[in-house]
Image: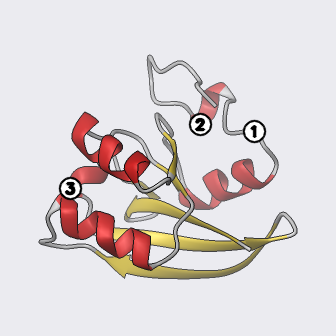
Amino acid sequence: MVRVAIPIFKSRVSPVFDSCTRVMIVDIEHNQEIERSEIYLDKLSLTERTAVLQKSSVETIICSGISDMFQSMLQGIKICLITGIAGEVDQIVSAYLSKRLNEPQFLMPGFKANH
């Protein structure tokens, strides 16, 4: 099983991971979504957010923007980051499962695919 986290705001990928209040956790097995849940990160420091994500066994994070410091912290605990992604969460999950996240409609304006 793979566990993917996506910071969310309403039904979209949150613009800045560092300050988001909710993260959707998507469990994937055999390239199929099997379960979704949410984690609330409101008022947690970056260190606390990192610990919660590690404790939740998150392996990959799909997000829009993230600070260099938070990115370094997450990479330090071996979490894979896919950054520069924008759009509706359901469409992003579908694109991830079908390996289409590098298509222009999922990238933040001016962002070049790095995955």
Q: Residue 105 falls in which quadrant of the image?
A: top right
Q: Name the amino acid, label 3.
A: Ser
Q: Whole-percent x and y of residue 110?
A: 44, 16
Which residue position is annotated with label 1? 100
- Quarter in which the N terminus is drawn: bottom right
**Left or right: 12 as drawn, with respect to 113:** left
Task: Assign a secondary structure to mark 1.
Answer: loop
Front residue of 9 and 41:
41
**Circle 2 residues within 10 Å: few <14, some 14–19, many ≥20:** many
Q: Earlier in the sequence, mark 1 or mark 2?
A: 1
Q: Is residue 83 above or below residue 8?
A: above
Q: Which residue is rendered at x = 62% and y = 51% of the image?
A: 92
**Circle 1 residues within 10 Å: few <14, some 14–19, many ≥20:** some
Contact, mark 1 vs mark 2 (Cβ under 8 Å): yes
Task: Assign a secondary structure to mark 3.
Answer: helix
Contact, mark 3 vs mark 1 (Cβ under 8 Å): no
**Left or right: 65 as drawn, with respect to 43:** right
- Quarter in which the C terminus is drawn: top right
Q: Name the amino acid, label 2.
A: Phe
Q: Whole-percent x and y of residue 22?
A: 33, 70
Disc on res. 106: 2
Q: Earlier in the sequence, mark 3 or mark 1?
A: 3
Q: Which residue is rendered at x = 54% and y = 53% of the image?
A: 88
Q: Is residue 66 above or below residue 18?
A: above
Which residue position is annotated with label 3? 19
